[in-house]
Amino acid sequence: EAADNMDYDGDVADNKFLGVFDPNLPGAGWNFDQGASTFIQVSWMARDPEVTGRFLAAIKEISTGVDRNNDGDLADSIPTFPYEAGAPRELDFPGVSVAVETNNAGITTRGNYGYYRISEADHRFDYNLDGDQTDRILQRVDLTGGSAAISMGILNNLVQDAVLAGRGADPKAIVWIAQESGEGPAGTDLNGDGDASDFALRYARIP
């Protein structure tokens, strides 16, 4: 809103919203098309590397007025995998009720699975049971709905996708960078070099 010098949602704050450019509208203008529902604010967004009709967004709880991850506040951002569907066409926002790193969600997809960077501090939960709530955790969700989301271990605070995978239509595995200092109260030496201050590679097969 600040860059556009507009107030789309009628409050004082300058927010970031999702909008759709509809070439069929008179004048080919932007259409937020929220109808009677609330505007959707985002803290992070990226293209989907696999599906052109879908993108990736961390939506802000406060824009929906719902505490999605049940931690007692509306301050979090939730990972979603929006796509266009329905008649008339609209954006659907399937997602997972966890708090991701607000400005560094790292959401990406590989082989019908979504991956993202959970913030223990924002979610107020010790995912890796190491006695603190300060870590970033890698989580995976089945985008077909066939299984529940699972946590895969410690991640990192690097500004990049949560995981990397080989290019092509059928990747077999994903790789991520684990931050040793985040595993346990004093860190964990994952690569056996006698300290817990490194970044170590970890990998997993895509189911």
Image (spheres, rainbow, N blue to C red):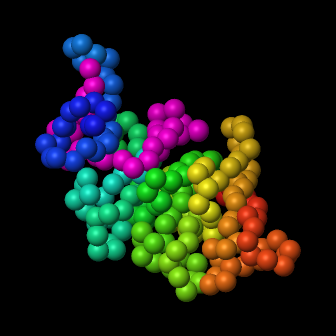
Please, what is the dominant secondary structure of the magenta stretch? loop
**Nearest the camera: 107 or 186?**
186
Left or right, 141 with reference to 41: right
**Which residue sits furthest right?**
193
Left or right, 119 with reference to 30: right
Q: Compared with residue 195, is residue 173 higher up or lower down, i.e. above or below?
A: above
**Which residue: 25% across, 62% down?**
66
**Nearest the camera: 197 or 123?**
197
Q: Position of residue 162 (x, y in %)?
A: 60, 55
**Which residue: 23% across, 31% down?**
5
Evaluate whether residue 14 shows in this view: yes
**Which residue: 28% across, 45% down?**
15
Is residue 111 in the magenta section?
no
**Which residue sits furthest top?**
27
The residue stretch that appears in magenta: 29-56
Q: What is the quadrant of residue 8 in the picture?
A: top left
Q: Compared with residue 190, is residue 112 higher up or lower down, i.e. above or below?
A: above
Evaluate whether residue 86 shows in this view: no
**Which residue: 28% across, 37% down?**
2
Is residue 55 in the magenta section?
yes
Q: Compared with residue 23, is residue 2 higher up or lower down, i.e. above or below?
A: below
Q: Position of residue 131 (x, y in %)?
A: 55, 86
